[in-house]
Image (tube, rainbow, N blue to C red):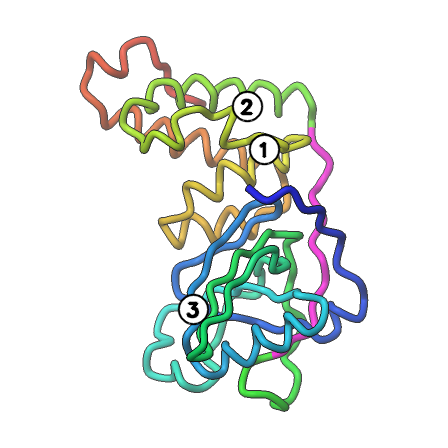
Amino acid sequence: MPAMSVTELDLLELNALSVFPLPNAALFPGALLPLHVFEARYRDLIRDALSGSKTLAIARLKPGFESDYEGRPPVFDVCGAGRIVEHVAHPDGRYHILLRGISRVRILGELPPATLYRVVRGEVIDDLATDPALAAALEQKIYQLWTVLAPELPEVLRDLNEVTAGAEGAGAFADRVAAVMASDADFGQALLSEPDPCERLRVIAERLQTLTDSLTPSSRSGVSRLN
């Protein structure tokens, strides 16, 4: 994981935020997202981003986008903004990039077409205040459930302390866990759209409980359902 600091979005960036729409991806604050960029419009986006602030947003395409993929099909209002922290430019114009998430952003409107790629106006979505006791209880529950699931997970994800390394606060903790559970696009979008860290933790714990319940009875002995 590259040791690079990422500052907050400024007003100039929010007033003209380049968007990379994808069908099944979510960029959470603090998380890393690798991408292979090969379409002409998105090669332009990355080239322009690299020559500027290195900032862009990942927005999820709404279902039914296929019929208008080459155009500007609708995307979900809440997206993840991040900065390019690593990139490889290939001779044929393709890029491999690594994005680090900065913040949740709500799309307020799309700017008139001036480039092949899409540009929007947005606003940062800040986390709501949390109840420390509730957050601590939910985090503990997530640790307990993760321990049960660990043998079923890829080795790199088995240690939750490593998955959440560097996360400060309930919101950051929830986002690090959400980032590795977002292969379910609807689940990922729901967590990205939720500004309440305790609610994100509750939803994550509920999903982990469902997963532990699907294991063999001996594997899930002693694990109680989260109310």
Disc 1 to disc 3: CB gap under 8 Å: no
- Over which residues does the magenta segment extend? 119-130
Q: Which mark is residue 62?
A: 3
State the separation of the CA atoms marked 1 and 3.
Answer: 27 Å
Residue 155 pos. (x, y %): 34, 29
Amino acid type, mark 3: Lys
Is the residue under label 2 in contact with that under label 1 (CB below 8 Å)? yes
Residue 79 versus residue 73 in the image, above or below = above
Q: Given this view, does label 1 or label 3 mark the residue nearer the observer?
A: 1
Examine the image and state in which quarter residue 51 appears. bottom right
Res 151 → quadrant: top left
Q: Which residue is mark 2?
A: 139
- For the residue marked with disc 2, what is the amino acid? Glu
Query: Which is more foreground, mark 1 or mark 2?
Result: 1
Q: Nearer the viewer, residue 208 or 151?
A: 151
Is residue 48 rendered magenta in the image?
A: no
Which residue carries the number 1 mark? Answer: 173
